[in-house]
Image: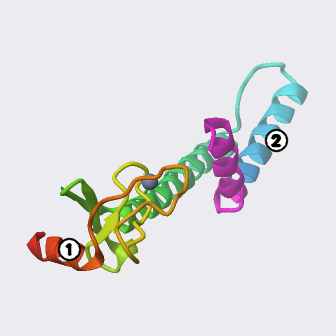
Amino acid sequence: MSFAHRLSKFLHQLWSTPVKASLIAWLGAATGIFVVRLTGPSGELKLPATTATELLLLTGALLFSVGAVAYSYHQKLEALKREHEEEHQVRDGILFKRGKRTGGKWMAFCPVCERPADTTILAKCPDTKCMWQAMKAQKDIDEVILQLPP
Ligand SMILES: [Zn+2]
């Protein structure tokens, strides 16, 4: 995914959160003040104290919502990272991985393209373009797995 795509997705998701209400309120207040400025009888650029306070509070609320949303995304990202955390070991030219995706068990993978190895006869890559294979049957692989960290 490109950066621009991710950014637009983020902004789109941001828009469907409490940020939207704060932003609209902020824009409303800012427009109100702008109109007051334009139609002020003396032509001076003075903000009515209450409106200025409201604007300040709304700006605070807006910043707070943006922060809260950014934090919740950060939390989600961390959870996703934990989900994909994997241990890697290379033995006899075969890549072994263990993680949530393998149900916490060591499994043989192609060391070239990292696809799960096909071990029906001899360990090989299921990708016909990759062509990686090892002279190891499932029982040899099981023996290697026994030597890996429990
Ligand atoms: Zn491969």
* Residue 102 lies in quadrant: bottom left
Task: Identify the disc placed on residue 140.
Answer: 1
Q: Nearer the viewer, residue 14 or 76?
A: 76
Q: Nearer the viewer, residue 44 or 65?
A: 65
Of circles 2 and 1, the one toward us is 1
Mostly what secondary structure, the magenta segment?
helix
- Type of residue at label 2? Gly
- Residue 20: x %, y % from top left: 71, 56
What residue sits 74% from the left and 22% below the top?
45
Q: Nearer the viewer, residue 100 or 128?
A: 128
Identify whether 113 is placed above or below 40: below
What residue sits 45% from the left and 56% below the top?
71
Q: Secondary structure at mark 1?
A: helix
Q: Mark 1: few, some, or many residues within 10 Å (few <14, many ≥20)?
A: few
Q: Mark 2: few, some, or many residues within 10 Å (few <14, many ≥20)?
A: some
Residue 18 relative to residue 33: left or right: left
**Mark 2 close to ligand 1, CB under 8 Å:** no
What residue sits 87% from the left and 26% below the top?
38
Identify whether 86 is placed above or below 120: above
Q: CA distance from mark 2 to mark 1?
A: 76 Å
Q: Which residues are magenta?
A: 1-22
- Residue 108: x %, y % from top left: 31, 67
Q: Nearer the viewer, residue 129 or 27?
A: 129
**Magenta stretch contains residue 17:** yes
Q: Which residue is mark 2?
A: 32
- Residue 60: x %, y % from top left: 54, 48
Identify whether 121 is placed above or below 59: below
* Residue 41 lies in quadrant: top right
Residue 60 relative to residue 7: left or right: left
**Magenta stretch contains residue 94:** no
- Type of residue at label 1? Asp
